[in-house]
Image (spheres, rainbow, N blue to C red):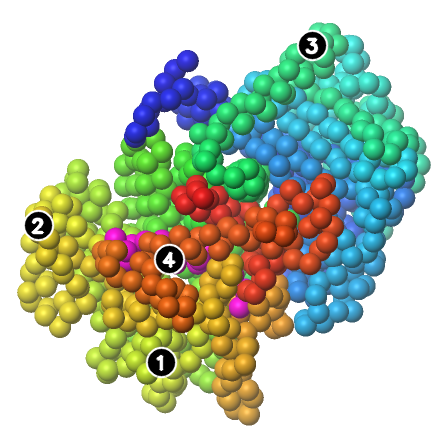
Amino acid sequence: MAKARTSKQTRPVTQEELRLQADRARKANWKRWGPYLSERQWGTVREDYSADGTAWEYFPHDHARSRAYRWGEDGIGGISDRHQYTCFALALWNGKDPILKERFFGLTGNEGNHGEDVKEYYYYLDSTPTHSYMKFLYKYPQQEFPYAKLVEENRRRGKHDLEYELIDTGVFDEDRYFDVFVEYAKAGTDDILIRIEALNRGPEPAQLHLLPTVWFRNTWSWGLDERKPRLRREASAEVAAIKLDHYYYGPRWLYCEGTPNLLFTENETNSQRLFNAENSSPYVKDAFHDFIVHGVKTAVNPNDQGTKAGAHYHLGLVPAGKAVELRLRLSPAAPSSASILNGTFDRQIAERREEAAEFYRTIVPENISADRQNVMRQALGGLLWNKQYYAYDLNRWIHGDPAGPPPPRRRLKGRNKEWHHLYNSDVISMPDKWEYPWYAAWDLAFHCIALALVDADFAKEQLLLMTREWYMHPNGQLPAYEWAFGDVNPPVHAWSAWRVYKVEQKRHGAGDRPFLERIFQKLLLNFTWWVNRKDAEGRNVFQGGFLGLDNIGVFDRSAPLPTGGHIEQSDATSWMGMYCLNMLTIALELAKENSVYEDVASKFFEHFVYICEAMNNIGGESIELWDNSDGFYYDVLHLSDGRRLPLRVRSMVGLIPLFAVETLDPEVVDRLPGFKRRMQWFIENRPRLSEHIEIEATDNGPRRFLSLVSRQRLKRVLHYMLDEQEFLSPYGVRALSRYHLDHPYVLPVNGMNYRVDYEPAESSTELFGGNSNWRGPIWFPVNYLLIESLQKFHFFLGDNYKVEYPTGSGTNLNLWEIAGEISQRLTRIFLLDDRGRRPVFGGTEKFQQDQNWRELIPFHEYFHGDNGAGIGASHQTGWTALVAKLIQQYGR
């Protein structure tokens, strides 16, 4: 077997690594097929053609089964090719539901008492980076699905109430549900083996229909490309087979075990049902629903052809405790014999399953507990499942399609009107393919850290993608997310690019310098945009709006202030300090081989020092974002009459200054004479500014410490951060201090009180839709950056710099040790505790105690600030997959 190159030793190359190498070299397109199908296309901005931007109402769940999507497709446990021309997913019916289950149900942003929320239980159990092996689980109730009850009860509940979940309805009582497993294994780049197993967990036999479905994304109805692909029954095959003919890929076949009833229709809108208008075809998108649920035999095409087809398995009553199993194969191999579903089928799936385990043994530390291994494996598997094909031509969306009615003229001045250049048609890592089935630039930066552990190539592609000219605005701004591409997210792209570079360097022995140089050039444009657009008065104090922290502030920081004026944001200014240091670090790395970058490094060095000065002396007026009496950083409200008022809320805003920290070692500086000479000139000729650079003499020369937070202020900030009555939770660092539980911050303005309370769980406000809360819960991305920052502080300050941990305990630890302790607290959210309970499950006893639930880990958007329970989006193995990096880094 071939040998892999690593920084420390050689080891056998795994089969999955060989596939990655072949894909990288473009010798074999192993990533052509993957889990690129969304879990929710309805209710998205892309599908919204309303005049007033009401995406949830314009295309609701009730329309999804009947209405052709314009920009993408969705399904259950599905796959597609990377252009999403061809899709495959599973549909189900239990004989009682009013709707054929073709997609997951959830509440819209306006129906949920805490915003949108999927009301289903499904799990990403495994995936390799090439998707050579994947496994998925859906828990399908045997009772009628309580659609109306979920809507009505959540509508009745208020912001201070818990969400009403599917488990609360009783449909899983007595284990009356099916565990439906879907496995995919690639026999070749385009040859996909599919195994479906449905296991009756209940005490009695239960009815089940399974409908594996294959269809084409509708590309022909919009007046742009009238070529129409076709599906038809393949009569020459010895097993049930559907032939796919698509002009892009050519012919392929879906082979189906047994004797299912093959159904055919068109992936086209049922206009008669939705709009009381004539259908263009008698066979429409919701035909299978009408055929199976209502018994309308004429709903499907008797000529066995169309653009949507399914293999209908009516399995009858599945005995209690028993399973049924189906085998299918999506393949370019023409019909030959029945052996295509027998012979080596099971062996090949078993081989791919073992090859996945072999691959992960090179990533998951072997010396950690089985429980930690399970969490890490599911986190990475979920991260890889959360890829999605994302299409959005914004200019076309605004102006409409040739075959469609012209959109309302108000759209010309509506959402995202400044982003006409944006043209997206790529596989992108999503935060959550149901709750957030659209990319978010700052989320993506964190995804890439965990992705780099398993597929550095994909991580780099994702980072570069956001800087391409058909994504990045011509002015240099990165697109935020489809609801408002012009919103401002924290500038973490450079940080992520550097971390991905270092992770790949550590894992494979060499970093990708062309990637680093390429992305650096584009980030120069983005940095310039920040400086020109978000420093309102040219004083190196930045604004940025909500900056991803939603409701953390007294006001909606993205809206005009009720007081007038603007907020000088501690977090915005600190993010820019961090951005400067990230760009400086990259420039110094590139300067090792190209001296041109020494000048650029000097620019970022000096800019960082100016930001340090501004944090401590805004505009030379002795006004600070640092409050010396409290020993903490605050936003400052700059009123239109010139007054400045610190907003004394102890929140993550005041901890973000810790992120801007770096050490310049003499070994690096001495190799770059141009940079060294300019830096020395700056220090000698700007003595007031150079006070912000701490210098330590060593045998090799001076070490220089660049940090927004001095070593003296660091201890004061950490006093709050490490206090269990303030920020430090048993499960990480809270976004808002618990101090505000008994001491809410209240600011009276024009007869109204603006208030910030400690809320460790869901938000009680409507800010940003009310489905997100930064006033107390624990968020992985900022916790990860805090851990990394403590490590960087330790790198300069060393083992002798210690602080009390936790505050008031009398125990002193160095900063590396504290970073490890916080990492363990975060990891603890997902692990079995001494009582055999996982904090992430909260008080849901079935999840905690049932052997068929307790090993299935949900990776939520954020977590309860006091008890660690999962909150928000339940499949956010985007940035919450950072737990895999923490487990890998700290092991036990």
- The answer to whether 624 appears left or right of 649 in the picture is left
Q: How far apart are the alpha carbons under marks 2 and 1?
A: 38 Å
Residue that appears at 72% across and 15% down: 341
Residue 363, percent from left and from top: 45, 33
Q: How far apart are the alpha carbons under marks 3 and 2?
A: 69 Å
Q: Is residue 354 above or below residue 830?
A: above
Q: Which mark is residue 630?
A: 1
Q: Earlier in the sequence, mark 4 or mark 2?
A: 2
Q: Is residue 553 above or below residue 271?
A: below
Residue 299, percent from left and from top: 88, 35
The span shown in magenta is: 776-795
Residue that mark 3 sits on: 343
Residue that mark 2 sits on: 699
- The answer to whether 440 appears left or right of 212 in the picture is left
Q: Earlier in the sequence, mark 4 or mark 1?
A: 1
Q: Nearer the viewer, mark 4 or mark 1?
A: 4
Q: Do callouts 3 and 2 mark residues in contact (Cβ within 8 Å)? A: no
Q: Do callouts 3 and 4 mark residues in contact (Cβ within 8 Å)? A: no
Q: Do callouts 4 and 1 mark residues in contact (Cβ within 8 Å)? A: no
Residue type beneath disc 3? Gly
Q: Does residue 637 show up magenta in the picture?
A: no
